[in-house]
Image (cartoon, helix red, strand yellow):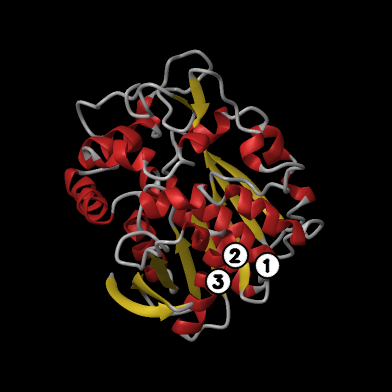
Amino acid sequence: MSSRKLVANSLNMHIKESGEGPLVLFVHGFPETSYAWRHQLEALAAAGFHAVAPDMRGYGETDSPADIARYSTFDLVGDLVGLLDALGCESAVIVGNDWGSTLGWQAALMRPDRFKGVVAIGVPMMGNPPVPPTHLFPQTDDELFYTLYFQEPGVAEAEFERDVGSTLRKILFSASFEAGARREGDGTPNPFSMVSCARGLLASLPTPEMLPQWLSEADLAHYVQTFSRTGFGGGLNYYRNLDANWSLQRSLNGMKIEVPALYMVGEQDVGLTIPGMRQIIDAMPQLVPKLTQSLVIPDCGHWAPQERPHEVSAAVIAFAQSVNDGEWRI
């Protein structure tokens, strides 16, 4: 892999890239960086693609604007369009995990002329709800949903940045397959659920004696070094635009994603514990009529590209080849 910086959408953006051929663009989630796609960049390059993974706005070596309002999905999709322009590419297949999936869906919805296929991991395509999202998330006198906990600037930052290494160990482990079977009532930890108002998000998460097998000490050190330098504020600002996104995206109500799509989810992904999530996944063809498959990856948690790199890479390669050959099938 090589790294470089370029200007995309007036943003100084850092990318990792490998290979030559049709462009496949990889978009990471929270709390990750372009490093999350290290396995896919190598695999896609070997398969004859130009694989590119940016540090998204607010992460890694890419600019992190101070204004929270500049982290809307419209700004972030604009960054991805700007990246295609900076790379001199007319179109690409886009692949995302976690927040990257949300952005992949929105990029394909808004700009099907530039994003000719989308692979989403973990987060399904969802329609705009009837009310702003923060009105839907649960909360009690003692607890609130993690997305609500992230809303107040500085609160989650103070907790997460107190010990960056411990924060990342806990979150990355607790959302992975190794944390537990994630069956109802089995006590498997979940960093993306309800948060204690008094104790914060991390207190209920275990500190693993050993890292999960897919995350080496060197891998963790890379993330720790990065987030120790940048903090977590940029990534948290994505969550602080949930209601703004809802308002902006009302202009897209009724539209469907008209490019080929592939959905993947780990069998133990934390997102599957959210009430109604499986019904949302089953209903996706109404919003994504060219959805080719919904794949469930066994023995896999939330970080599928890192937990099960061979399975994810193989699925992305097959999909990207079919899109570029014009041979996709429903």
- Residue flagged by tag 3: what amino acid is it? Gly
Disc 1 + disc 2, Cβ < 8 Å: yes
Residue at 40%, 23% in the rendered image: 189
* Crowdedness near tag 3: few (<14), some (14–19) or many (≥20) residues, C-alpha within 10 Å: some
Q: Image height check: is 139 above or below 26?
A: above
Residue 98 drawn at (x, y percent): 49, 48
Is mark 2 in CB contact (under 8 Å) with mark 3? yes
Amino acid carrying label 1: it is Met
Q: Earlier in the sequence, mark 1 or mark 3?
A: 3
Q: Position of residue 78 (x, y in %)?
A: 55, 71
Mark on residue 324? none
**Residue drawn at (37%, 63%), measured in percent from left and top?**
64
Task: Find the distance from the CA under tag 1 to the CA under tag 3.
Answer: 10 Å
Which of 262 and 329 lies nearest the eye of the viewer?
262
Q: Which mark is residue 110?
A: 1
Residue 140 lies, with reference to residue 74, above or below; the image says: above
Residue 149 image offset from top left, x and y in percent: 47, 34
Mark number, residue 74: 2
Can you say whether 252 is above or below 166 in the image? below
Q: Quadrant of residue 217?
A: top left
Query: Looking at this rendering, what residue extends furthest in the right direction?
Result: 254
